[in-house]
Image: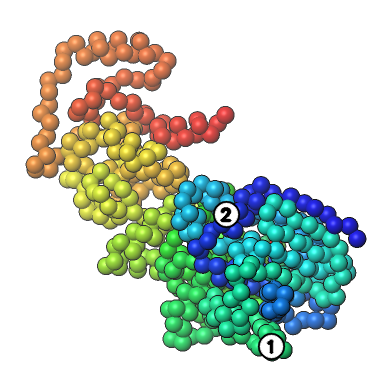
Amino acid sequence: MTLERHGFQAEVSRLLHIVAHSLYSDKSVYLRELISNASDACDKLRYLALTQPELLEGGGDLAVTLTTDKEKKTLTIADNGIGMNKDDLISHLGTIARSGSAKFAEELSNAKTQEQKVSLIGQFGVGFYSAFMVADKVEVISRKAGESQGWRWVSDGTGEFTVEAVDKPSRGTDIVLHLKKEEGEWLEAARLEHVIAKHSEHVALPIHLKDGAEERHVNQQAALWTKSKSEITDEQYRDFYRHIAHAWDEPWATIHFKAEGKIDYTALLFIPSQRPIDLFTPERKQSLKLYAKRIFITDQSDEILPGWLRFVKGLVDSEDLQLNISREMLQASPVIAKIRAALVKRILSDLNKRANDDDKAAYESFWDNFGPVLKEGLYEDVTQRDEILKLVRFRTTASDGWVSLTDYVARMKEGQKSIYYITGDSLDTVARSAQLEGFKAKGIEVLLLTDPIDEFWIPAVEKFGEAEFRSVTRSGSDLDTVKASEGEKEEEKKPVAENVDSLISFLKITLKDSVKDVRLSERLTDSACCLVADSGDMDMHLERLLRQHKR
Ligand code: ADP
Ligand code: MG
């Protein structure tokens, strides 16, 4: 039988190098990653077997088995899930396919210090490759469900791997870790059990531990979400969040509820406290897991939550979904549509509670992380617009902190009818804009909008209550009607210089095709002139953004 040699994709090699040299990170990460892969593989098989029962080959009891061999110094993590054939081994274990991992690899190579790298690995895990933290050689022996040929993949984690055909009587995957000299602790049952209890307790699959002649079942395997809230500790919620979201931070919010009535379902949702690195990939994928009667169906459905809530992690388990529902059927399912509407409502109302909580800093940390995503909902979902507007926070000219629209409106000047805003690329540049001079002089607060998404929702939303949103870069922002408050001295009306008309005519002729009009303005105090958009025209920053995107 021939042995094929392959090189790793460049990103993988880089990742492997960093993983192998990150000496101080929590190495137990590898066990959670490999067990979670085994669990994913079993979930995939279980789902496919709903329509193709022959894939189970008569063995439907899915499990993960850890076996230690003290003589050979190996730890094997075996599952009887979907398995991999030759092509799968080469593509899944030789390249980084997920956009999230690619981004991760990029961030890793940008990280300068060892601490930054370790913290990135700690935050996100590195999937299969974390095996090389404890092993100097990894063997993957696998046979795909429904196929008869087995395959063996081997690598020492530097540059290359080999693949060859082998006999494998049972379906599934064995990951054999040849432990590094100093990693002997992973041959101790007690050490393994401790880590499993910590990170993998909620894997919905039996985990067996074989140590010499002894074999034990080591995890609880209870579906946490089926228990009542009072039976679950904060620590259990946190561990479950980390397991299901592949995360290492604390959940910022935990939302657990059962709905009974026309549709029965349980939702266990989490909002992370750290922003995941793949939040702004173009796919805008949500990642909620969908279960039907405790059986995993998919985490690839875009129907269960809108894109603007894609930062929400967790799961939904319904009694009213057919087990063999296909992904296409999900799209048309009225049950899913109803669950989605209920989840959106619940998440927004919980956010609203937190927004009005005394702990302002906590809400602001959420806003820092996920505000730009939530704002996408303002133009995508008209029905939720009013609810979302209550949650939005802004930087403004009047405060160093975050400001709500309610705060803004409460501070509006006598005679002020509009909510003024300016858009741009960064806080620094917009705050220094000459267009703000007249507003500053009158003490009028202006929203400083710097997220690209702001250009899209602002024209769609138009109003908050009675007040219209109005760009300061448009002419016709009638500052005249607003009185300056006491203490802010109203600029004395300077008599207009006599020859200003001829100056304007001169400018109009000179700038002819470059400008639409030249006007005398009330809005400047220090600068001599500024550019504005005409009242009916596109906002200046939007025009610039669009021009940049058009080649
Ligand atoms: P992720 O699990 O996030 O996709 P990993 O690096 O952990 O990333 O794994 C990469 C891929 O390798 C998986 O997506 C899966 O296709 C495949 N894989 C890994 N372990 C197994 C396994 N035990 N059984 C089947 N496929 C596996
Ligand atoms: Mg994985």
Amino acid on which disc 1 is placed: Glu
Quadrant position of residue 234: bottom left
User: As rendered, which of 76 and 172 lies closer to the eye?
Assistant: 76
Quadrant containing the N terminus is bottom right
Amino acid on which disc 2 is placed: Ile
Answer yes or no: is residue 333 visible: no
Residue shown at 64%/67% (left/top)? 180
Quadrant position of residue 76: bottom right
User: As rendered, which of 192 and 428 lies closer to the eye?
Assistant: 192
* Label 1 CA crowd tier, 10 Å (few <14, some 14–19, many 20+): few
Residue at mark 2: 18
- Sequence-first disc among 2 and 1: 2
Where does residue 299 sit, x and y in percent of width and height? 62, 65
Residue shown at 65%/87% (left/top)? 217
Left or right: 165, with 369 as reference point: right
Answer yes or no: is residue 241 visible: yes
Left or right: 541, with 300 as reference point: left
Residue at mark 1: 215
